[in-house]
Image (tube, rainbow, N blue to C red):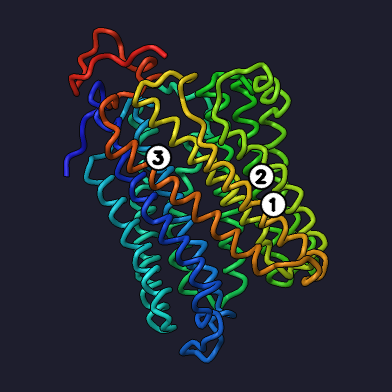
Amino acid sequence: MEQRETGPSYTWAAGSYVDLFLAAAVTQILFAVSLYWLLFVDSSLVSDISPGGSALSSSNLPMLAIGIMAGVGWMMAIVQGIGFDITPLNFKTAPFDQSLISMVAALNIAGQALMFIGIVSGDAELFRQLGLMGVTLLGTSLIMAGPLTFRFFRTRSSSLDKIGPWSYGPGFGLPVIGMMTILAWLFADSDVFFELYWTVLIDSFWGMMAFAVIFGHFHGRCNWELMDPERTHLAFKVFIALCILHIALVFANETGQISEDRVNASFSLPLVWIFLIARPDRIWKKVRDGEPHSTQMLSAHSLLLVTIVVGIYEGAFMENDTGMFYSRFLLMLGVATQAIWAAGDWLHDDHRHKQVKERKKPWPNIVSMFIAMAGIVYLFVDSASGGGELPRIELVKLLTVVFLAFGFLDYLLWMVKDAVFGYSDWQRIPMFYGDRDLEVDEEDPYGIGVAESE
């Protein structure tokens, strides 16, 4: 299929986020139901026997399914939606076609749906087979989208992006994540590959993506000038180096080359770095001064510090008993999820040309996620103290899942209300991005007029 030519036609992709946002909203509910199902309805998948004779719990498949549905499924759909929408405006090129967006969305939904059916079926063999089909579709969607990053580089006429390599760095990792996702399911019985997969997907990729979104909001969208352009590139290189160090240490420990479980605490090294270079002092000064910003993005940034503390203790003092579960849960659903939700919310309001001071704060969502993350911290403290020391653990588990589900449902209702039925004030070219990219005398291909000033 022919690609659209670069030049003024790069604006055709603006507004293309809606399909992927809706896909994420629906599949988040599948994720919440799957998590609840495995914990409280039917736990047979974590105790049944696989065809090879090993318990499925030892093959890591249930945990792998939940992690993939989140980290490669609905979360990836949101960031891809944002990327398809604003990257062409930033780089002034759109070297892809609408069919690619539709294909990515379809593969994402189908992959998660197959995994969901496998989980609720209660049949271990069916779960394994449908899961393999699901991860193949999800992995393929990333492998297809990955080369776009290279094409953006080759065809861009200029770059108006303010966060440098943080905007395109995650894109280079998409094919790697896609391939590793498929291999992780095939080699689920390998604890070494299982742990390597999480260090790449969650610790490194989603750590990078979460910071890119947070940094992009405060430094780029809010124009708070947190970092000089030269330091932006240096900060990215140091982050990559710390991620490689973390991956190498964990891999060496898993393969027996070193015998020191405390190297898992290196999980927090890249996070400490990005927390400090984001200049929390400047962020909070702007907040105290009343500068407009996303409250949920601030919540995500604040939880980064909690994640760092939990990661250090869990890695250094819990002897690999938890597999860094609590730290990764906080990073994925506390930091990264809130960051991409906030970015998506602001992007949609940009398309509505809604003034920043008039934008609503999603307090029900923020509060529900805060309670859910507080539940995770509570469970972490109980595990750190030996287990069974704190009261009402099962109730806390249930409430954590319930409040997570409430957050997902709130996001779905927001999407239906604002994105499906809220088109009265919606414009294809968003404010802020359109103001920078579209010349006043440039023909608007959609007949909606030049983007208004903020």
For mark 1, give the secondary structure. Answer: helix
What distance separates the C-alpha of mark 3 from that of mark 1? Answer: 25 Å
User: Residue 298: image x %, image y %?
Assistant: 61, 33
- Determine which of the numbered discs, if any, sits on residue 245 in the image: 1
The answer to whether residue 57 is above or below residue 164 is below
Amino acid marked by disc 3: Thr
Rendering quarter of residue 166: top right
Rendering quarter of residue 132: bottom left
Amino acid marked by disc 2: Ala
**Would you say 235 lies left or right of 209 here?**
right
Amino acid marked by disc 1: Leu
The answer to whether residue 404 is above or below residue 222 is below
Q: Are marks 3 and 1 in contact (CB under 8 Å)?
A: no
User: Residue 382: image x %, image y %?
Assistant: 77, 64
Q: Which residue is mark 3?
A: 149
Q: Are marks 1 and 2 in contact (CB under 8 Å)?
A: yes
Front-most of residues 134 and 44: 44
